[in-house]
Amino acid sequence: MVYADLHAHTTRSDGEMTLSEMPAAAREAGVSVVAVTDHDRIHPELDAPVTERDGVTLVRGIELRVEAGDQRVDLLGYGVSPTAELERELDRLQRDRMERGRAIVENVEDRLGVTLDVDIGEGIGRPHIARAIDDHPDAPQDYEAAFDELIGGDCDPFVARDVTPFERGCNLLGEACGLVALAHPLRYPDPASALALTAELDGVERFYPYGRAVDTAPVEQAIEEHDLIVTGGSDAHDLTLGVAGLSEAQYRAVGERIG
């Protein structure tokens, strides 16, 4: 049983769940703690680093994408107390997200000869565009095919977005968060290089639903080598929580860091 699901997204970024729906979804899954880790955003309705809603503990978090050499990785910040510098950087990233989202939508519309129903607002991500493609009656691609054929990183309509350099991201989150961890380390093109970054972090996402068999030995080695705090979560973008996460005993180390 998962006690703490420390990786979940809301409609504030590219998730389908509202913050008000989160406690009920947690109770249904038997989860006691949920970290709200929207992409490059801090949920404005959470007024403290750790709070309780309807019997469920909610952790104010963030998932920040950073540039680390030849690849981009995601950092999870937990127990956020926003600094002015972090807020300025997040504002910059949201402006870039909207510009990039608008460009991708225009490219896809030109390619397919359709008009997509997409709200180009703060927090827009490729899942919003993929859903709009899937919903359009004249677009042959479903959600998965939209990524494979249109908006994946190797597709012509794709537009890369600007992200924060790794060192700056570490500094910004380190000043604002009780704990900073590397997200889903085995998802990256070069997991070894990604795991090497944990030498400068507090933790690593040990438990994650990769959807395939993975060798977690390199993660375990990094945990031991760098004395990392273990995190874990479902990376929920829908209404389901508790797919992956921590036991109550495993969560204690996280809880001590974030208050």
Image (spheres, rainbow, N blue to C red):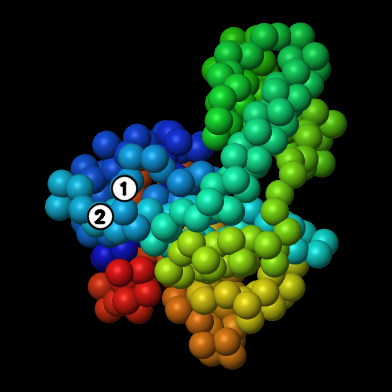
Report which residue position mark 2 lands on. 51
**Mark 2 belongs to which amino acid?**
Thr
Of 135 and 44, the residue lying toward us: 44
Left or right: residue 98 compared with residue 8: right
In the rendered image, is residue 247 in sight? no
Give the position of the C terminus as an image quadrant: bottom left
In this view, the mark in front (1 or 2): 1
Q: Which residue is mark 1?
A: 47
Q: Is residue 148 above or below residue 102?
A: below
What residue sits 41% from the left and 43% below the top? 43
**Residue placed most toward the observer, 103 or 173:** 173
Q: Residues within 10 Å of mark 1 (few under 14, many from 20)?
A: few
* Residue for point 46% across, 64% down: 177
Left or right: 136 in relation to 28: right
Q: Are the residues tagged 1 and 2 within 8 Å (C-beta)?
A: yes
Q: Is residue 135 above or below residue 193?
A: above
Residue 123, given in percent of the width and then of the height, sits at 55, 34
Residue 37 seen from this side = yes
